[in-house]
Image (cartoon, coloured by chain):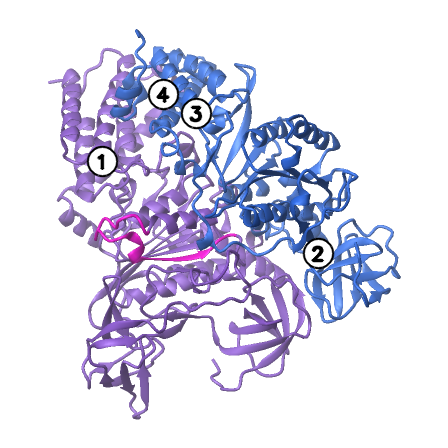
Chain colours: A blue, B purple
């Protein structure tokens, strides 16, 4: 990082903790970037001339006479077309061996979009996965996380969704990614020949945890550039946001803040919302869509991280292993896309909403039948049929290896309805049943 | 409050997130508003603590780049709302700045736009005559705002009696022109324009008294109007885990409720939800007047990415606007989504000030703050004998879906209607997911309301509602028995009890908010369907075995559901009604 001329160099640090150091300085702005013994740091507290700096990489080895230089600006990223196809670290420095990417310098974590300048999202994102397209349709400008246990293949599903989503740019924010997963993403994108439209900001598990706090802001600043300046459709992948929240709690703990639920800072909701709300659809076609991952501990969604996330994002996607068909499915009960109402039955066929609901309702009946079976009760004929339906529904539609278009998904559903149920049992609007019911004889 | 021409000044000495410490040279007041000079912009802030010569202020903006030594100017007043004609149809931020007149795609720090156009001319008609006695809130004249009569009132800040010395002739005047002059007992003249200011954290008290609510407020949502009605001037809250349909519920109420004015405070929620309102309200029709919904609506948007300190202000701003319109004798509906975000904003601030925390790190006085806010709602008799009302419904987003957390518990103590959204109902797509047994409306215990309900709907309405609740209750018990003993381990009567409650659930409780017909169910149609459903549940039916019960009732529900989806009393509606009659005849006994 280059320094300005006539910069004042401070060499007397008065206090050092694990993550912060404090010194006397003047003319320093809040949130300003500084270099402490060559390490990036940011102003987090000012009390008269006492300035407290948070050192992202930790304060290990910093002496009290270390050189401190203030940069006169908040953390920033040089944005431009040169970003495309590149891999960067949390500070926006290249990690792919290439030169520094040139462009216009912009502060990260900038202001919010005026809500009246947003457009209602209405453009459907198709993924070919029926568990998403049919039941939990995604829309540009949406923000939605996968709620997944660490052993589930969320990164694979996310990479698949990203490549099929027809986005102009895909921006990967890797937060505490294992090196293996980092290489996985790199390979998948390379093999798909998509590298030219991918930009990655990666902090791996080898890097200091507090640096992670910069990754989502870097990724989203780059996304805003392409969406606002270039009117592009940008898809941002953030994995894993649980590690981001963990980094927040480390910092808040070191700043002596009173923790609230699950040792998380009281501002967790606002901190997460500031990132997720960067998802936006603009009038002129540019958009930022965020697909994130929040790993759960033992499937517990009442923990503060998934709980706050759920209140911020527009739905959530759950993966589940269906033991009966031996495949991973998108769980139709717990998954939800809040924005689907804006496109289903409008951008897709008119029967879409009711087909979706009927299928899920029948699938719920099957779950009840299964409980009965497990408790040793006799099943009625209807119960038996729901179980058979559930198996086929799971195999032909919910499994993540399905790749068909939405029209085909609806046809499969109608075909399953007719095979296992009467019209009264399916219970949809009569006009729709008259139009689409598959006559078994034909 | 000090009223001095000489304002106090100060300089910034410390910054921690959005808490700034200002060293002052003269008196400052708690909650006084000040501006911090940053380059060529001024950032608004509010005093929240004073220690010696240090004022702790919360800044309503990002504090990035602030430095010690920056100049601060104190204004001498509290956070105020500017009130006058032109508020309707506006989209405001939490501090009542017009979002539409701001420039650029991104919100700019320190860009504070006017609440409404001060130069617009309004056609004024006087309502009071020279020599009239005037007190705070007296109607002096009237203009028409979006086809709604907008009263020009004596300022709420007045204390005591005044005499109207001058009132303008009918004609077009700018909002800021003097349209009346009042004199106090000592002959001091007070000019009055169409614009006045009011500190948002104080309740407007310009009315005679606040009776107990006694009139239903129709929402078109069956599970509310029929089972647990909200009333004009009532308070209610909707707690529910995420994904249980809080927002859809609130939007349905805001679109359909029988109100003159609707104020929506989107407090720390998703921006795209506000965009839904921005997009749909100018298009959709108010079912009561046929005018566009936006004509009767004002939206206060402090979305979750907007500054936290303004979040607390946003609910107060919304309440103050509601009180302003209530004082004109109008029926106002105020919706806040979600009050939990407001409580969290208080928690963040309390934490930064290093106060000793209460439960879940919320400030100790949270219950008092919440109850004080809810108490500002209500129906009132104005000084001129007219009524006006604020019905307030807030949503609560309980952490982890656990209703035993401080915000839910504090709200439960003050709100009279409780609409519990159940995760289980939401999971099985039974929307609206309001649990009929856990939820309640305390107003059903008010004899004055029961009297008006029986007069307005039907003489035996209260009994019918009681019967529906009994059916639901018995159904729940039956479901538990069936679960324990198995389908063949219980009597056919138990199956019947279960299925009768399923009929009530599917036809009265469930409602498709996205279906053009079913979304709104007017009161007379609710009454009709309640009769139909009770007809079904009261019909004695004959079954050979329990296995026949399930498929039979599925047909009953299917026919009734088609009725819900059809235009009321249309050909199709009657056809399904006939179909239902035939199904019932198949197994009717006696």
Q: Visible in this render: residue B435?
A: yes
Pick whichever, A282 or B238, lies toward us. A282
Q: Is residue B232 left or right of residue B247?
A: left
Q: Are marks 4 and 1 in contact (CB under 8 Å)?
A: no
Magenta residue check for A10? no
Discs 3 and 4 share one subunit: no
Q: Position of residue B369 (x, y in %)?
A: 46, 61
The span shown in magenta is B282-304
Q: Nearer the viewer, mark 3 or mark 4?
A: 3
Q: Which residue is mark 2?
A: A255
Is A385 left, or right, of B531 in this rendering? right
Residue carrying label 1? B467
On the image, numbered disc 3 is attached to which residue?
Answer: A406
Viewer-nearest of discs 2 and 3:
3
Parent chain of label 3 = A
Distance of label 4 from label 1 (alpha carbons): 22 Å
Percent across and percent down for residue A244 are: 66, 44
Q: Quadrant of residue B41?
A: bottom right
Mark 2 vs mark 4, foreground winner is 2
In the picture of the structure, the residue carrying the numbered disc 4 is: B482
Q: Position of residue B377 (x, y in %)?
A: 34, 60
């Amino acid at each position: 990082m280059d320094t300005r001329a006539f910069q004042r160099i401070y060499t007397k640090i008065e206090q050092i903790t694990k993550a912060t150091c404090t010194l006397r300085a003047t003319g320093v702005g809040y949130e300003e970037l500084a270099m402490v013994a060559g390490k990036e740091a940011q102003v987090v507290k000012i009390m008269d001339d006492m300035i407290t700096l948070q050192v992202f990489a930790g304060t290990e080895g910093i002496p009290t006479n270390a050189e401190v230089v203030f940069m006169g600006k908040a953390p920033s990223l040089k944005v431009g077309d040169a970003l495309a196809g590149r891999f960067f670290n949390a500070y926006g420095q290249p990690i792919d061996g290439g030169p520094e990417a040139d462009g216009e310098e912009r502060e990260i974590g900038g202001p919010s979009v005026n809500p009246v300048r947003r457009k209602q999202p209405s453009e459907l994102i198709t993924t070919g996965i029926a568990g998403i397209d049919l039941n939990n349709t995604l829309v540009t400008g949406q923000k939605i996380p996968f709620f997944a246990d660490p052993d589930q293949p969320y990164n694979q599903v996310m990479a698949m969704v990203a490549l099929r989503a027809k986005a102009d740019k895909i921006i990967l924010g890797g937060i505490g990614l294992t090196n293996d997963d980092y290489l996985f993403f790199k390979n998948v994108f390379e093999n798909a020949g998509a590298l030219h439209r991918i930009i990655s900001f990666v902090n791996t598990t080898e890097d200091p945890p507090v640096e992670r706090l910069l990754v989502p802001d870097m990724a989203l600043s780059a996304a805003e550039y392409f969406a606002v300046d270039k009117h592009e459709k940008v898809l941002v992948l953030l994995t894993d946001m649980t590690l981001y929240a963990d980094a927040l709690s480390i910092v808040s703990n070191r700043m002596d803040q009173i923790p609230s639920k699950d040792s998380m800072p009281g501002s967790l909701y606002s901190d997460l919302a500031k990132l997720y709300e960067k998802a936006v659809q603009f009038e002129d076609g540019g958009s930022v869509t965020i697909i994130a991952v929040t790993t759960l501990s033992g499937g517990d969604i009442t923990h503060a991280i998934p709980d706050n996330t759920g209140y911020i994002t527009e739905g959530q996607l759950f993966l589940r292993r269906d033991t009966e068909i031996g495949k991973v499915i998108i769980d139709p009960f717990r998954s939800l896309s809040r924005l689907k109402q804006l496109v289903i039955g409008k951008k897709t066929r008119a029967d879409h909403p009711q087909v979706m609901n009927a299928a899920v309702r029948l699938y719920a009946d099957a779950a009840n039948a299964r409980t009965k079976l497990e408790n040793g009760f006799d099943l009625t004929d209807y119960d038996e049929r729901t179980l058979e339906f559930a198996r086929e529904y799971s195999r032909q539609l919910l499994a993540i290896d399905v790749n068909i278009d939405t029209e085909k998904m609806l046809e499969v559903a109608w075909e399953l309805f007719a095979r296992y149920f009467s019209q009264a049992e399916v219970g949809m609007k009569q006009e729709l049943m008259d139009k689409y019911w598959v006559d078994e004889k034909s | 409050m000090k009223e001095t021409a000489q304002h106090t000044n100060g300089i910034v000495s410390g910054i921690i997130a959005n808490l700034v410490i200002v060293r002052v040279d003269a008196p400052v007041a708690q909650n006084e508003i000040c501006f911090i000079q940053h380059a060529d912009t001024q950032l608004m802030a509010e005093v929240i603590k004073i220690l010696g010569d240090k004022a702790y202020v919360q800044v309503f903006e990002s504090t990035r780049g602030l430095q010690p030594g920056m100049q601060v100017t104190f204004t001498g007043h509290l956070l105020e709302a500017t009130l006058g004609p032109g508020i309707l149809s506006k989209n405001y931020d939490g501090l009542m700045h017009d979002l539409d007149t701001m420039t650029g795609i991104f919100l700019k720090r320190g860009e504070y736009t006017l609440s409404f156009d001060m130069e617009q001319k309004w056609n004024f008609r006087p309502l009071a005559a020279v020599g009239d006695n005037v007190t705070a809130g007296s109607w002096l004249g009237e203009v028409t705002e979006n086809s709604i009569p907008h009263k020009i009132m004596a300022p709420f800040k007045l204390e005591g009696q005044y005499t109207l010395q001058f009132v303008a002739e009918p004609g077009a005047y700018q909002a800021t022109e003097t349209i009346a002059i009042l004199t106090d007992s000592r002959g001091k003249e007070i000019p009055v324009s169409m614009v006045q200011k009011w500190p948002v954290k104080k309740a407007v008290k310009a009315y005679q008294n606040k009776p107990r609510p006694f009139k239903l407020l129709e929402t078109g949502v069956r599970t509310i109007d029929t089972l647990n009605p909200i009333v004009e001037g009532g308070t209610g809250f909707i707690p529910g885990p995420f994904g249980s349909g809080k927002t859809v519920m609130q939007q349905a109420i805001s679109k359909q409720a029988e109100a003159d004015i609707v104020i929506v405070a989107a407090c720390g929620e998703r921006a795209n939800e506000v965009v839904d309102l921005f997009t749909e309200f100018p298009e959709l029709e108010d079912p009561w007047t046929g005018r566009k919904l936006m004509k009767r609506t004002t939206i206060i948007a402090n979305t979750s990415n907007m500054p936290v300190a303004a979040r607390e202000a946003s609910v107060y701003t919304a309440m103050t606007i509601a009180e302003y319109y209530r004082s004109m004798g109008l029926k106002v509906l105020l919706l806040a989504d979600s009050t939990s975000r407001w409580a969290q904003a208080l928690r963040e601030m309390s934490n930064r000030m290093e106060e000793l925390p209460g439960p879940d790190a919320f400030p100790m006085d949270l219950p008092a703050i919440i109850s004080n806010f809810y108490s500002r709602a209500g129906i009132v008799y104005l000084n001129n004998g007219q009524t006006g009302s604020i019905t307030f419904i807030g949503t609560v987003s309980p952490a982890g879906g656990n209703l035993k957390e401080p915000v839910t518990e504090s709200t439960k103590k003050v709100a009279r209607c409780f609409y519990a959204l159940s995760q289980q109902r939401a999971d099985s797509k039974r929307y609206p997911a309001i649990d009929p047994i856990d939820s309640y409306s305390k107003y059903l215990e008010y004899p004055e309301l029961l009297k008006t309900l029986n007069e307005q709907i039907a003489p035996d309405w209260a009994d019918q509602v009681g019967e529906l609740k009994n059916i639901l209750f018995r159904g729940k018990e039956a479901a538990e028995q069936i679960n324990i003993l198995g389908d063949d381990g219980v009597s056919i009567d138990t199956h019947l009890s279960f299925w009768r409650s399923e009929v009530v659930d599917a036809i009265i409780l469930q409602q498709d908010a996205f279906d053009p017909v079913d979304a709104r169910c007017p009161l007379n149609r609710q009454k009709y369907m309640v009769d139909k459903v009770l007809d079904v549940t009261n019909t004695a039916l004959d079954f050979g075995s329990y296995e026949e019960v399930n498929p039979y009732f599925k047909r009953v529900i299917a026919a009734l559901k088609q009725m819900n989806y059809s235009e009321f009393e249309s050909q199709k509606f009657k056809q399904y009604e006939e179909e239902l009659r035939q199904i019932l005849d198949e197994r009717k006994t006696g």
